[in-house]
Amino acid sequence: MIEIGQTILEFPPLREGILIKRYKRFLADFELDNGEIVTAHCANTGPMKGVLWPGGRVRLKYSPSPKRKLDWSWEQAEVPSHNELRKCWVGINTSLPNKLIKYLIEANCLERELGPISSIQSEVVYGSEGKSRIDLLLDPVNTNKDIRKIYVEVKNTTWCDNSLALFPDTVTKRGQKHLRELMSICPNSRAVLIPCISRNDMEYFAPGDAADRLYGELFREALTKGMEVIPCSFGFFNDHISWEGVKPFRNFQEKRD
């Protein structure tokens, strides 16, 4: 088992620079620390609320390949933290959360919440119309007290209000559909929502009602149907990602005057 604060994923050191601008959702221009201007792929197609800071520090991965249109990928961004004495690095690559959660489960880091698991499948078709795909489908060991299949939906979470991590950061029809699909498999199967909190300065998780009121309503309805919520927090560094533990969650985003 990986202990809290330990490394869950290692990679070659990332290159640092500053963000010049993001455009066409998938593209962003950067100035590297050596003065070179590069264009990188941005895997995060959302508004990146609270994370998109032109002039802010960033980390990029360089991986040239004949199969890639761009040699660079935007991986991390440095943002202000609720702790005014420091800043925080945030993971913005939306292809990572599913891998991180899968690693956690394989390392038995979520055994207390999920029970022992015998197998993990990715991107399995499910839902009322058979047109949705669940991020992870888990089969518990046959000696587990609860032998129902476990459907896990993972959400990359970077937006925050002080120390409260929030998802979503914009209206998400897709996210609303996922909540409805999770409700549809209860109680015959376990429905689990895992917010992947891609920053290590958060203390709680809540639905982002201010960005999507309907998502918040569906989130609370899903809780009454039996959906489980396991917010998982990670720390992002120049050459690794650390496991920062399961965080508690709240049903509402607190309103501010």
Image (spheres, grey):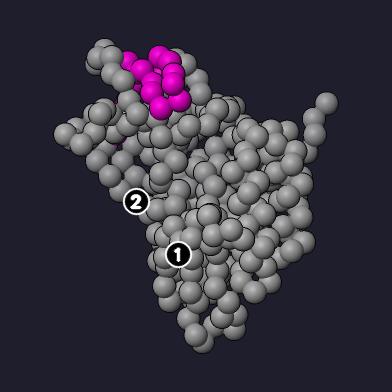
The residue sitting at 48% across, 69% down in the picture is 138
The residue lying furthest to the front in this view is: 129
- What is the three-letter code of the residue carrying label 1? Ile
Q: Which residue is mark 1?
A: 105
Label annotation for residue 155: none
Q: Which residue is mark 2?
A: 9
Badge 2 element = strand
Mark 2: few, some, or many residues within 10 Å (few <14, many ≥20)?
some
Residue 84: x percent and y percent?
Answer: 59, 27
Magenta span of residues: 14-31
Residue 192: x percent and y percent?
Answer: 60, 61
Using residue 42 as the reference point, say whether residue 157 is left or right of it: right
Residue 93: x percent and y percent?
Answer: 42, 38
Q: 78 and 150: which one is in front?
A: 150
The residue sitting at 31% across, 20% down in the picture is 39
Q: Check the image and report above or below for 4 versus 72.
A: below
Determine if residue 203 is in view.
Answer: no
Numbered label tally: 2
Residue 236: x percent and y percent?
Answer: 42, 41
- What is the three-letter code of the residue carrying label 2? Leu
Residue 119 falls in which quadrant of the image? Answer: bottom left
- Quarter of the picture holding the N terminus: bottom left
